[in-house]
Image (tube, coloured by chain):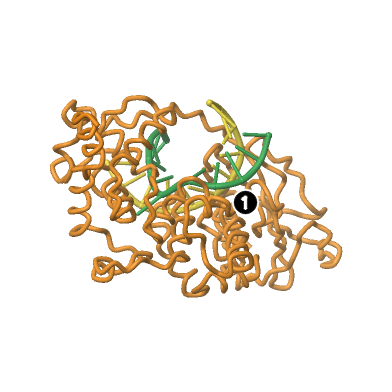
Chain colours: A orange, B yellow, C green
Amino acid sequence: MPVECREKIVDERAPSPIAAALLDHYDTHARTLAWRVPPQQRKAGVLPDPYRVWLSEVMLQQTTVAAVTGFFNAFTSRWPTVEALAAAPAEDVLAAWAGLGYYARARNLIACARAVALDHAGRFPDTEAGLRLLPGIGDYTAASVAAIAFNRPAAVVDANVERVTARLFAIETPLPGARPQIRQKVAHMLPPDRPGDYAQAMMDLGATVCTPRNPSCLLCPVAEFCEARVCGIAESLPVKPPKKARPQRTGTAYWIELDGQVLLVQREGKGMLGGMRALPDDGWSARRNGNAIEPVAGQWTQVGAAVAHVFTHFSLTLSLALYRGPQIDKVAIENLSGACWWPVERIEEAGLPTLFAKAARIAIQHR
DNA sequence: AATCCGGGGCG
DNA sequence: CGCCCAGGATT
């Protein structure tokens, strides 16, 4: 075999100096997070509980660490194992998820926990491919659980890693087109002995140093390797596609209270806020305004203060109407699909998504 | 490849 | 106020 060829092979297997610098920095600057094992144990080679890694990763999908931490602690206190979560009533899990958003995650979380408990004897698959087959686990989450919980050499690419990598290699191709190239760079740098720490080191760097705006290049452990910094274009990377305008919609929610109880409904299993408890409303959606038709005949009071709420792809101005009588038949109104009466004093426990929690708060002030 | 799906925090 | 975030499922 020619020497050049052998050298090339050896060169490709040489540890990436970037990964080495990242890991050194991680060893002294890793964030302390609720789902991580303490530094002492981590340095001793102790891996985190796959259940906790999976739960944290699902919660962290498009969601910040600050928003997740409280929910993670509440979930793991209440359901310490995947078997416990699998055995929980779905409505309890959905209610516990209320306020965290992207409720399909909660529905998939339940399905995944039950699949692991029933089909895998309570053990998460320890490979990327095995994990990828479970509900709610896509490319990113499969790679991250495989790397972090099982130390598998998986390329973990989230928004942090995309940003760090796009800057390190001055990749000016707009996302998502740049993803294959980014993924290849991440895989190429991957240190075979510490895939989990490497993934978390990249994410920590993106979260604390290589931030979207005002990156702290002076504090960056890999600044000397960063092509974007040399070019002075770090802050402009990665290039993202232009955002679409958000339509403005209007709708109405209805507060029907009788004997200290308020009428709630359960929303359809799919779509907006799917499966969640809610106030009855007039059918507003991202596509159209609500029809403002009251669910039952009677006297209604319009509350002046409406709820302004911003979703990912539209903004909603939600009006609120309070039922003022005459006294209605409790049984009759339960014909509304998924209707149930809920004690007003315990409204916090109903598991209302934030939009309806806001509306309920205003209704209680005005009743 | 596009679109749909929450909510909060930050500059 | 706009931008961002440990993305996945569906079409």
Q: Is residue A173 or residue A280 the one in the foreground?
A: A173
The image shows residue A55 at horizontal and vertical percentages of 48, 61
Position of A46 with respect to A349 (left or right) is left
Residue at the front extreme?
A1
Position of A146 with respect to A113 (left or right) is left
Q: In which quarter of the image is the C terminus of chain A?
A: bottom right
SS at badge 1: loop
Q: Name the residue under label 1.
A: A273
Three-letter amino acid code of the residue under disc 1: Leu
**Residue in view at x 43 percent, y 69 percent:** A73
Judge the density around disc 1: few (<14), some (14-19), many (≥20) Cα neighbours within 10 Å: many
The image shows residue A65 at horizontal and vertical percentages of 38, 56
The image shows residue A264 at horizontal and vertical percentages of 70, 61
**Residue in view at x 39 percent, y 54 percent:** A152
Image height of A206 relative to A125, above or below:
above
Image height of A41 relative to A223, above or below:
below
Q: Quadrant of the N terminus of chain A?
A: top left
Q: Quadrant of residue A329?
A: bottom right
**Residue in view at x 31 percent, y 33 percent:** A166
Q: Is residue A336 or residue A96 the one in the foreground?
A: A96
Image height of A60 relative to A85, above or below:
above
The image shows residue A71 at horizontal and vertical percentages of 46, 64
Query: Label 1 lies in what chain?
Result: A
Q: Is residue A228 or residue A289 the one in the foreground?
A: A228
**Residue in view at x 66 percent, y 60 percent:** A277
Q: In which quarter of the image is residue A5?
A: top left
Position of A198 with respect to C6 (left or right) is left
